[in-house]
């Protein structure tokens, strides 16, 4: 029986990789340890419903702040991913079968947490014919039924081994925001995201808009992996060409010595420069800070995103 708390068993595909030095984090990266009654209450609901969160599995630095406010990003389809990206702390290997009762448990937790906005993500499930598309759709429908006032943001895999009907299934379930992260610049894909393809992911997001032009699309990248500024600006241009509405940029943090090394810590001033450039390129919403993550402040950002579209259309 694997113990996913042990790094060597959590990431067997990385066991032979040489250790990478983990530099000391600068002052602008450090966060407080998770404490407080709100944090405990959120954790209790997650455990009672036997739910997995990307907040814990990916080692998000914002877990204390978000859980204290009752916000958590649900990770469906299990806690074991079929990919072995070198930046990611989610366990890898052969997952269990999909849990048919999970959509209902997610919906029940959303209702109990009283969420105005929920983010639902997943591991990659290359072992499933549709990549988990129908499971996503069932979860969206279950949340709509149990918590009709909650807006839904999904953060999906790339469905790279699936037919076009997989994406169509998810879009037809009508999430409010469709997010799929490009993660890094194309030149770093062979090392950082070897199981994926940059232009496939970009095309996936473009096709969402072709299927439903009213659906908000969102994508994000990490910096500090070894990219340069020009490559980041080119990714912005590629995203705008695909009509992506919302861009997130955050600092890459190395989970263990076996993961991809931190090339450098990007300064807050550089992040401000990226944010200014992104606004200039026409994104409706931008979040670019060292601690930015896909679902960080997602509810507040969704409200701003919706208002930005209304202003653009002259309706606000």
Image: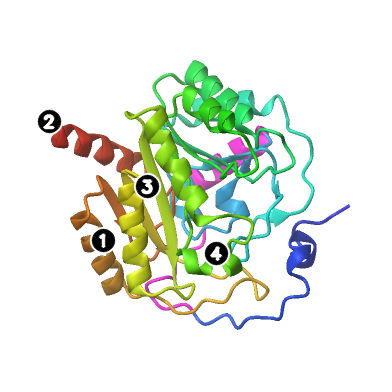
Q: Residue 81 at what x, y percent from top left?
A: 69, 49
Q: Earlier in the sequence, mark 4 or mark 1?
A: 4
Decide: few, some or many residues near mark 3? Use Cα within 10 Å; few <14, some 14-19, many ≥20: some
Considering depth in this image, is 123 or 2 the residue closer to the camera? 123
Which residue corresponds to mark 2? 316
SS state under label 2: loop
Q: Could you say where residue 9 lies in the image, as x and y percent from the top left?
A: 80, 62
Residue at 47%, 54% (x, y): give it.
182
Q: Earlier in the sequence, mark 2 or mark 1?
A: 1
Q: Nearer the viewer, residue 252 or 182?
A: 182
**Picture colour scheme:** rainbow
Occupied quadrant, residue 108: top right
Q: Which element is circle 3 on? A: loop
- Please indicate, yes or no, whether residue 176 appears anywhere in the rendered image: no
Residue position for label 3: 297
Are there few (<14), some (14-19), or many (20+) residues within 10 Å of tag 1? Answer: many
In this view, 90 is above or below 43: below
Left or right: where does residue 127 sit relative to residue 151?
Answer: right
Between the C-alphas of marks 4 and 1, the distance is 23 Å
Residue 263 seen anywhere in this rendered image of the structure:
yes
Find out whether the residues at labels 2 and 1 contact each other: C-beta distance under 8 Å: no
- The quarter of the picture where the C terminus appears is top left
Bounds of the magenta segment: 25-49
* Residue matched to label 4: 189
> Left or right: where does residue 99 sit relative to residue 181?
right
Residue, x 65% and y 55% (percent of image)?
A: 90
Task: Let me know if residue 203 is in the magenta part.
Answer: no
Which mark is nearer the camera, 3 or 4? 4
């Amino acid at each position: 029986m694997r113990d996913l708390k042990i790094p060597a068993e959590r990431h067997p595909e990385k066991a032979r990789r040489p250790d990478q030095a983990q530099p000391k984090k600068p002052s602008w990266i450090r966060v407080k340890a998770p404490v407080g009654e709100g944090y405990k209450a959120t954790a209790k609901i997650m455990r009672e419903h036997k739910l997995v969160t990307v907040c814990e599995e990916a080692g998000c630095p914002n877990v204390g702040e978000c859980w204290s406010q009752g916000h958590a990003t649900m990770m469906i389809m299990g806690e074991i991913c079929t990919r072995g990206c070198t930046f990611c702390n989610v366990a890898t290997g052969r997952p269990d079968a999909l849990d048919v009762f999970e959509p209902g448990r997610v919906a029940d937790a959303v209702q109990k947490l009283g969420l105005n906005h929920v983010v639902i993500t997943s591991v990659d499930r290359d072992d499933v014919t549709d990549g988990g598309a129908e499971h996503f759709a069932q979860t969206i429908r279950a949340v709509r039924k149990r918590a009709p006032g909650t807006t839904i943001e999904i953060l999906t895999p790339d469905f790279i081994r699936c037919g076009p009907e997989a994406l169509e299934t998810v879009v037809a379930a009508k999430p409010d925001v469709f997010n799929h992260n490009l993660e890094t610049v194309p030149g770093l894909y062979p090392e950082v995201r070897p199981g994926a393809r940059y232009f496939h992911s970009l095309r996936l997001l473009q096709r969402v808009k072709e299927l439903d032009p009213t659906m908000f699309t969102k994508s994000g990248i990490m910096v500090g992996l070894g990219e340069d500024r020009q490559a980041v600006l080119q990714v912005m241009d590629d995203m705008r060409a695909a009509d992506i509405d919302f861009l997130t940029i955050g600092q890459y943090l190395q989970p263990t010595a076996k993961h991809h090394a931190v090339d450098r810590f990007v300064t807050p001033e550089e992040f401000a420069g990226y944010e200014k450039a992104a606004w200039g390129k026409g994104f409706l919403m931008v979040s670019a800070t060292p601690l930015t993550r896909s679902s960080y402040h997602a509810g507040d950002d969704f409200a701003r995103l919706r208002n930005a579209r209304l202003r653009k259309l002259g309706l606000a």
